[in-house]
Image (cartoon, grey):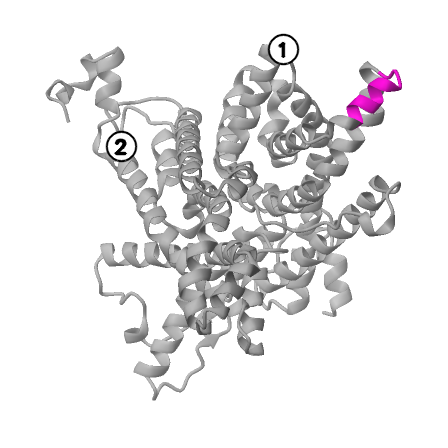
Amino acid sequence: MSCIDIIADYGLRSIGLGERLLPRSDFTLCHQFTLIGSGMIWNIYFGTLALTSGFILATLLALGKASKNFYVRKLSGWFIFIFRGSPLFIQFFFAYFLFLSLKQSFTFLSPLTSAWAGALFVLFCNTAAYSGEIFYGALQAIPKSDLEAADAYGMSGFSRFRRIIWPTMLRLAWPAYTNEAIFLFHATTLVFFSSFPAWQQRGDALYYANYFADKTFNPFVPYPILAGYFILLTLILIGLFGIANRKLNIHLPKEEHSKIKFRIRLIR
Amino acid sequence: MFEFCSNPENLSGFSWLSCYLTTPKHMNLFYSVGTVLLLLLITAPTALLFGFGGAVMARSKILLIKVFGNAYISIVRGVPDIAFFLFFVIAIDQLLEWSRHKILCPEWSEPIRQGNDFVVCTIAKLPLSSSPQWIHEIYGFLLAVFTFAIVFGAFAANVLYGAMRAVPKTQIETAVSFGMTERQVFRRILVPQMWLFALPGLGNLWMILIKATPLLFLLGVEDIVYWARELGGTKTAKFTSYPHGDWRVWYFLGLMIFYLAFTRVSELIIEKLMRTLSRGTATLGGALQGQVGR
């Protein structure tokens, strides 16, 4: 069987298209590359959707934490504390079993017990909390003079937020937010190891890498392949966020574009 | 455990709960909390040692060592750490067995990798198949500790490397002008001064390490996640005197509260430590304190 056949059979296996059974023997390099790559679809799905939806909630959380209203401030603070203070792995388990018991009373919640919705929801809350804290820090660091200038122009309320506060906040938070995005994508590999079932063996990249490592008892092939895919994904993310960073700082002279620096902050 | 527990059917309310939570099986859950603490206690200094080695290597003047050190540090970027955990546990195990095989059974002619099997001679097995269960458990735990130390050592190396570069150049130059050798500068000036710069990063790392401990479950250790799943599942009256429905959600809620308390207390201690250490270094204190707790 040539490699092109294998790609045709297994290229979209992780979303249920193509061959039904996973290969059981005679694993070739092509098998491993194709299936692990096919699993990346899930990692990209979880990462992209959680990041974009989490971005909105994160902005709200940051504003909430800086709010003058006592209850709003406490609520946002606790949300951020709970999701940043406990391990994502435990959050997945807890959410899964919670959804499982909720399903019995509210049948419309049953999608939440499958990974595509339930795990996405947890990742959404998790990344919102982490980015919310980043945005909150940036919000506190907005130069007073910017706000005074806005006041002097007679801006207030929403237009002041949209034109001054929000862009400045994003500009300041962007390097840290880039890191958050990268590690969110890395965190997506936990999904299928934390009770969320991989229905019909439709799993993510690490799920398939682990499958091959178990079957061949040779970790030295599948995991480096997985690493290669993730390094590629990370580079693409850095590129995309770099473009956004240039857009955000377009008004500054070229040398002053704050270069995105990478600081570690890994497992949640 | 308690005397009134001898007849669980007659119990109710609080006394039922106190009996339920002290069954021998539940004791395993509490012991596994000890396992987590033990892992942290061993891993933290080991990872720091690995990190120190990595940072020194990355600063080396010899190209090969420098490249190796930098490669070690940069494994933390790009690749999910869970993949490293899963990889290293098998890889280290096979590496050990393979080298024992080479030493202990030199006359062995068959290949080690036969298709999908990894075959070494019987006396090269780790641990020996004749050894008791607790040796297998300890070996598994040690593998996990070593894996954690490698991965977190890379993170620590990154922090320490940055901290070494953050020590003011003037301090180093002053030491050199006093006629200190390179080693003396390293030992007397650089290392003592770098800790203050490293502390926010190391504190952060400690929090990450705490939050990584449930991953022990993935490495095949019977840890709190394992027992929470085990004990929380539905129990019928046939097999236990404490039947209950699916309580896993409560067990994991308990674990979440445990971790929240643990990270919160650590955060407070680190903040306090930071304030104490930066006393007298007025210029740095304020700037650094903002970064704690990332």
Q: Residue furthest front?
A: B178
Report the magenta residues as a range. Answer: A146-155
Q: Residue at x 68, y 51 (%)?
A: A261
Please determine whether, in this image, residue B294 is positioned above or below residue A13.
Answer: above
Question: Label 1 belongs to which residue?
Answer: A69
> Residue visible at 76% across and 64% down?
A5
Which residue ends up furthest to the bottom in the rendered image?
B107
Please identify the quadrant where the C terminus of chain B is shown: top right
The quadrant holding residue B120 is bottom left
Name the element at disc 2. helix
Residue B131: within the magenta? no
**Of residues A109 and B87, which is closer to you in this image?**
B87
Label 1 marks a residue whose chain is: A
Residue B79: x and y in percent read 60, 55
Q: Nearer the viewer, mark 1 or mark 2?
A: 1
The picture quadrant where one finds residue B46 is bottom left
For residue B59, what is the image quadrant? bottom right
Q: Position of residue B122 (x, y in %)?
A: 30, 74
Seen in the picture, residue B23 relative to B3 is either above or below; the reply is below
Spatial separation of the CA atoms under disc 1 and disc 2: 44 Å
Q: Nearer the viewer, residue A198 or A144?
A: A144
**Do circles 1 and 2 both sit on a common chain?**
no
Label 2 chain ID: B
Position of residue A111 in the picture relative to residue B182 (left or right):
right
> Can the viewer see residue A19?
no
Callout 2 environment at 10 Å: few (<14), some (14 to 19), or many (20+)?
Answer: some
- Height in image: A205 above or below A146? below
**Residue B67 on image: x %, y %:** 58, 72
Q: Which residue is mark 2?
A: B26
**Crowd tier of the residue under label 1, counting other residues whose Cα lies within 10 Å: few below 14, some 14–19, many 20 or above:** few
